[in-house]
Amino acid sequence: MPEVIEDRQLFRVLYVENDEPRVQAFQRAFQSQIDVISVPDGKAALAYLDSQVPVDMVLYNDTLDSTTFLNGLRAKRRAVRLPVVLLTERTGVDLTTQPYQGYVIDAFPHNYVEDDLRLRLNYLIQKKEYEQNGHISSKSASIRIPIGKRLFDIGLSFFILAMASPILVVVAVLIKLDSKGPIFYSSKRVGTGFRIFDMYKFRTMRTDADKMLASMAAHNMYNKPVAEKPVDERCEICQLANTECQRPLFMDQKQICETLYQREQKAKAMFSKFKEDPRVTRLGKILRNTSIDELPQLYNILRGDMSFVGNRPLPLYEAEKLTVIGYNRRFAAPAGLTGLWQVMKRGKSKVSDEERIQLDVLYAKSYSFRTDMLILLKTLKAVWQKENV
């Protein structure tokens, strides 16, 4: 069970359910982590949301007309950030379609596995804490990593760090000489059991990378300028409606607008034909091509954030987009420096999101010391491939 932090406001869940035994079972299972408010139907849920009492998540019984509730929630502009988890017996619910899109982040069966739902709740609890405080102080529920795998990670990471320490010092000095900015780059990542941690790399890009990207857009071969961001970080729709952001994403150090983010991603695609990214420093190209930029992640491995082999830890906004229980299973495996999808697909062809997730799920179901050793051996060959990305 995760540690309970004294004097910390519990995560509040509005449970829409007219079966009292189900509500009581849910409360017993998660009472150390959350505060449960129970209402019998969607109408009562919408009325409760009109009150001034804060709610962090809605757990909704799909048989109680979830469509009407979600349409009502859509009309409540201030409740748009509220995540909804469905309890349903339907299979294959497409959460990217209306009325679910933008509201329902996951779907579980009524006879859900407690540990699976706990993983999801754990991530949302940490996400809330990070949004409020900028850091994570509570510990998530741990997934037990085989002792042999952990001892191997500790021994090998300590040995490599000790042997490579002269290289690390030289690289750190070269980075400071090559360009202005910090030596290391860190970003929030979601790893084992939805645990959020800081993942470290050597910095390979210039500190003015964003400004350079805008300049590239102005002079690209298609002469198509990048749309300017609104001053208040909202898209035109939200500005005209005079509401808060209706499509928020939680990414690294701040909340961003999903509409603006997708627009920026499309703009970035215009530069895909450039063989060299001018935002990457001269030294950064070498560090990336040799994967030396990833060496600081040995520190993450030593402290237990990651393993040598596992599923790649994801940025928070990507983890938030992984819905349905089948996809969540990837987080039951250790977060890794390298993994199954890297050695199977790297350098061969573009990997689709679905393909990558399925490979991650496969690893989570079947990883062993033998498979880890095979992946590590294949990584030694793949790591030297030239990739200017």
Image (tube, rainbow, N blue to C red):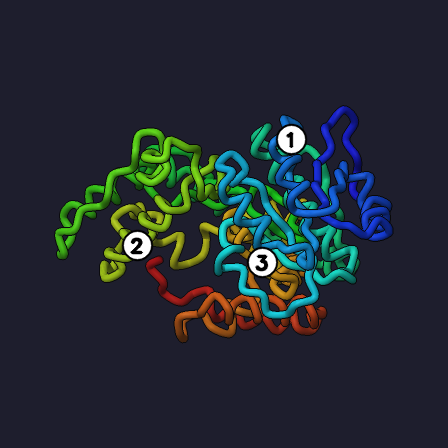
Would you say residue 376 is visible in this rendering? no
Residue hosting label 1: 54
In the picture, which quadrant includes the C terminus?
bottom left
Q: Name the N-terminal-most of marks 3 and 2.
A: 2
- Kindly identify the residue that appears in the image at 72 percent across and 62 percent down: 109
Say if 324 sits above or below 43 in the image: below
State the image quarter where residue 13 is shown.
top right
Q: Position of residue 64 (x, y in %)?
A: 68, 55
Compared across the picture, whether 49 is left or right of 38 comes to: left
Q: Position of residue 167 (x, y in %)?
A: 48, 47
Residue hosting label 2: 266
The residues tagged by marks 3 and 2 sit, at their Cα atoms, a distance apart of 23 Å
Would you say residue 182 is visible in this rendering? yes
What is the crowding at mark 2: few (fewer than 14 residues within 10 Å), some, or many (at least 20)? few
User: What amino acid is found at the position of numbered circle 3 in the picture?
Assistant: Thr
Residue 323, numbered label? 3
Residue 204, numbered label? none
Mark 2 falls on what kind of element?
helix
Q: Nearer the viewer, mark 3 or mark 2?
A: 3
